[in-house]
Amino acid sequence: MIHLHWINQGMLSLNDIKHIIESGKPVVWTMHDMWPCTGICHHARECTNYQEGCHNCPFLYNGGSKKDLSYRTFKKKLALYKNANITFVACSQWLRSQAEKSLLLVGHRTTNIPNPININLFKPHDKKEARYKSNLPQDKKLLLFGSVKITDKRKGIDYFVESCRLLVEKYPEMKEQTGVVVFGKQSAQLKELIPFPVYALDFVSDEKAMVDIYNSVDLFVTPSLEENLPNTIMESMACGTPCVGFNIGGIPEMIDHLHNGYVAEYKSSEDFANGIHWALNESEYPTLSEEAARKVATYYSEGIIAKKYIDIYNKITGKDE
């Protein structure tokens, strides 16, 4: 058996995948985005061409054409998958539902297994000590926002900025009581955009440092406009830090609204601001924090995810019969 993950066309070409399939071994392919079920894109957004056959790709220059790169690649994948013994595993229920609409996956097994997390590393710690390690203030309620590149529009920076403006407008006292911790490239730029003190950390690659950061803050905010199953939400919740995110992709599968976080109406800065205020000032915060950590331990721990994959392997090889 061969298990593929996020190989796409950068690590393995379609010809490489063809050789793997022609080996005759069963293939389990974990989908971390939509590329395996579309012509060329990682996220189809509003486009539904992949459901019947890609063409006129909106992501190509001038909107593509009838037989553009997306069309040609889709046809190659269609031939590649035909009669192949592939089980597609999506990392979220949302991604599985999108994949099952694709003409490419007709007749193939699909299922859904989330990414795992090491809950022995990502777990709750003392907040005061974590703030001391991260050189963050003890006297403020802290929000955490981050991505590889802060200014990436897909990460919803504009909605977060507007939410902060709305919060200060409606609750002026929050301006002195609240701070925003930011990690990622160009994080310092946020200082000029929002009305709260900003503590810029640049890009953080050390996992132990990230554990301290998650434990330092009161709330993780993710106004991302397109997501599968964000690791950052999982890591934050594992550390007992609740999250606010938009109702998109796999986010509402992770955050249980008003139980361990807040799921805001998609692209609504006002509702996103409501979620921040509710979590910080109106919720039973200790319970919210406990439920966030419990959700991750119950559904995403390495042991639980490993068992789900073992079950799939056994079904494919007939060992569970």
Image (cartoon, grey):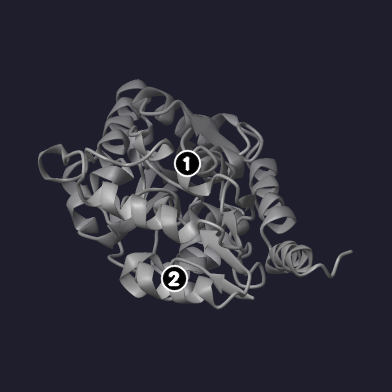
Residue in view at x 74 percent, y 54 percent = 298
In this image, 282 relative to 266: left or right?
right
Q: Are marks 1 and 2 in contact (CB under 8 Å)?
A: no
In this image, 32 relative to 152: left or right?
right
Residue 233, horizontal then vertical, whole percent:
51, 52
Q: Which residue carries the number 2 mark?
A: 18
Question: Which image quarter holds the C terminus?
Answer: bottom right
- Depth check: 133 or 41 in front? 41
Q: CA distance from mark 1 to mark 2?
A: 20 Å
Residue 43 higher or lower than 114, as above or below: above
Instruction: Residue 193: tell me if it is visible.
Output: yes
Residue 317, horizontal then vertical, whole percent:
76, 70
Residue in view at x 38 percent, y 67 percent = 135
Q: Quadrant of residue 29?
A: bottom right
- Depth check: 32 or 69 in front? 69
Residue in view at x 59 percent, y 56 percent = 89
In this image, 290 relative to 318: left or right?
left
Residue 27, horizontal then vertical, whole percent:
59, 68
